[in-house]
Amino acid sequence: MNRKGIDEPIKVITVCGVGMGSSLILRMTAEKALSEMGVKARVEATDLSSAKSMAADVILGQEMHTDQLDGAAPVVVGITNFMDTEGLKQKLEGPLREQGWLE
Amino acid sequence: MISVLDVEVGVHVDGWQAAIRAACQPLLDGGAVEARYVDRCIEMVSSHGPYMVVAPGIALAHARPEDGVSALGVAVATLVEAVEFGHPENDPVDLVFAFASPDNDQHVHLLKALAEGIEEGLGVSLRQAVDARAARAALEEVLVGV
């Protein structure tokens, strides 16, 4: 069986108001964090309204946005500093382990 | 190719709206954007919250290509008095970046270089720059090859 996050990538989306600036910065940080954690992932940046209808495994964004996206994905995490790779790793570790996406 | 690149150093503003205007001014002066682009950048915060305050002290203002962008541009304003955007943790902001992209792809390398530059201390170089020329040189340095 292919295991998510290990054999096949999890789908991660990063959100912001427009979907091309802040969320792109967060996408780069998330790609770095996930790769350092050894989690296979495909990360995409999008705007808040599109995020609501996208089937994702993980949604990352500012809390003011992720509060509106609760339940839209199995893992929804509010991120304050979009440039802090270490901080992002810490925030992701628990939820990803809980889902079995991190060994 | 980046057609407008500039820094405004030591700007005095009385709030986040004026801070965004200051950061966007070089884009406007250089012809990369129309005046409505600047208004849209402010509206983005009014309607979606201060999400563009992406890291402590740093905001990244922008709107969409269809909001009046004609060329790729990036600009920064360093503020003398930091302003509150209303972000729960990253306020106050004293470094405001603004960018404009004519489509959904041209800015990708620019932002990647900018993010890497900030990670390596671009923020400090800009804040400590003695004049606009030194600040511009610091920004140009991280954007070499973009």
Image (tube, grey):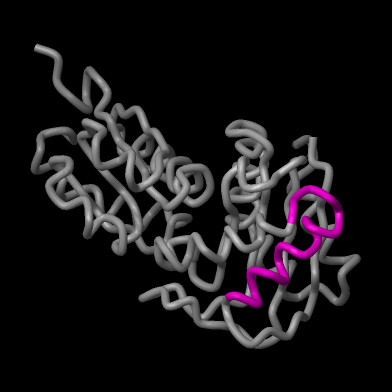
Q: Nearer the viewer, residue A57 or A95?
A: A57
Instruction: Classify residue B100 as left or right of residue B15.
Output: right
Quadrant in which the N terminus of chain B appears: top right
Image spot of residue B142 (x, y percent): 74, 49
| B43 displayed left or right of A72 | right
Residue A88, compared with residue A43, is above or below; it is below
Name which residue lies at 33% across and 45% down: A49
Query: Residue B28 colored magenta?
Result: yes
> Count the marks: how many?
0
Residue closest to the far right: B133
Q: Residue at x 81, y 61 (%)?
A: B26
Outermost residue, top direction?
A: A1
Q: Position of residue B3 (x, y in %)?
A: 83, 43
Q: Is residue A95 left or right of residue B41?
A: left
Q: Quadrant of residue B112?
A: top right
Which residue: 51% across, 81% down? B92
- Tell whether position A34 is magenta: no
Q: Reply above or below: A49 against B47.
A: above
Q: Residue extending furthest front?
A: B36
Residue A5 horizontal/vertical position (percent): 22, 28
Position of the C terminus of chain B by quadrant: top right
Q: Is residue B93 above or below residue B121?
A: below
Main secondary structure found in the magenta portion: helix
Residue drawn at (58%, 51%), measured in percent from left and top? B63
The stretch in magenta equals: B17-34
Q: Quadrant of residue B8?
A: bottom right
